[in-house]
Amino acid sequence: MIDKSSPVPIYHQIEEQLKTQIEEGTLMSDSALPSEREYAETFQVSRMTVRQALNNLVNDGFLYRQKGRGTFVSKQKVEQKLLGLTSFTEDMVARGLSPSNKLITFEVFPASDRIAKQLQIPPTTPVYEIQRVRLADGIPMAIETSYLPASLIKGLTKEIINHSLYNYVENTLSLKIERATQQLEASIARESETKLLQIDKGAPILLISRTSFLKDGTPFEFVKSAYRADRYKFVHHMDR
Ligand code: 16G
């Protein structure tokens, strides 16, 4: 399995093999890896070489270590294509994952200047503030805080928001969602976020702000989301 005459360093060949096994599911997420000694015997290489390969895979997020317990396979990230304008519910269902929500805040309040500007409404216009933890197969993926003009997105309830906002907007209110502009930046989890996302303080997160518009050009939502960087990656395609 290892080609010692290859110009590719042996630790790199081991890394590639383990990555393939992770991607193909031969090495399942959260399963314990064989010991360095076992790998050294299997690959007929030194333990130092195995350690170097495993260290690199830990640093790249493919594996994680637990003190006194060993090395384990990380969960694969959810790949989000930045192509169409889709909802969280649609994205998860398309991947065969089961979406759920944990509602944190559901209020109506007068829009601040900043939110009014994003939604192109006069300041103090009533807006919903809805904060949800969004989960996939029971694992928290993101905290999403949405602001929606109350006079436009009429009749929202906690029950509706516990399912899909976009489904309600399109199928019940019969409004046509057309486009959105989105910003994506890196950050570090704050105390309040670590609890909701079940991650360590200082863990990396991806911050997204999105303003979405109806067909007639009216902004109907301004959303700020914090995604777990260990569980999510964004992929986009570019034509030239
Ligand atoms: C996505 C959108 C969010 C939208 C939500 C609706 C991003 C960054 N955000 O999470 O803007 O409000 O979907 O989801 O993609 P729902 O229909 O499942 O409630």
Image (cartoon, rainbow, N blue to C red):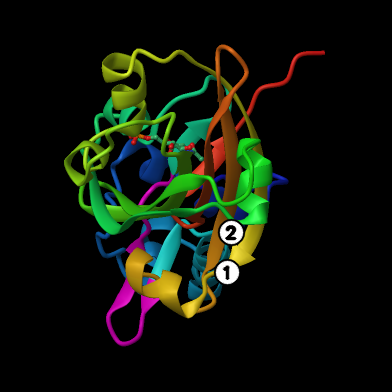
Counting from the top left corner in percent of width and height, residue 60 is at 56, 59
Find residue 36 and report its image quarter. Answer: bottom left
Query: 51 or 160, which lies in front?
Result: 160
Q: Secondary structure at mark 2?
A: helix
Magenta span covers which residues? 65-77
- Residue extending furthest toward the left: 159
- Residue drawn at the location 61% of the way across and 53% of the way down: 12
* In this rendering, position of residue 45 left or right of residue 119: left
Which residue type carries mark 1? Gln
- Residue drawn at the location 57% of the way across and 45% of the way down: 3
- Residue extending furthest toward the bottom: 68
Q: Residues within 10 Å of mark 1 (few under 14, many from 20)?
A: some
Q: Is residue 9 magenta?
A: no
The residue that disc 1 covers is 52
- Res. 107 visible in picture: yes
Counting from the top left corner in percent of width and height, residue 200 is at 43, 76
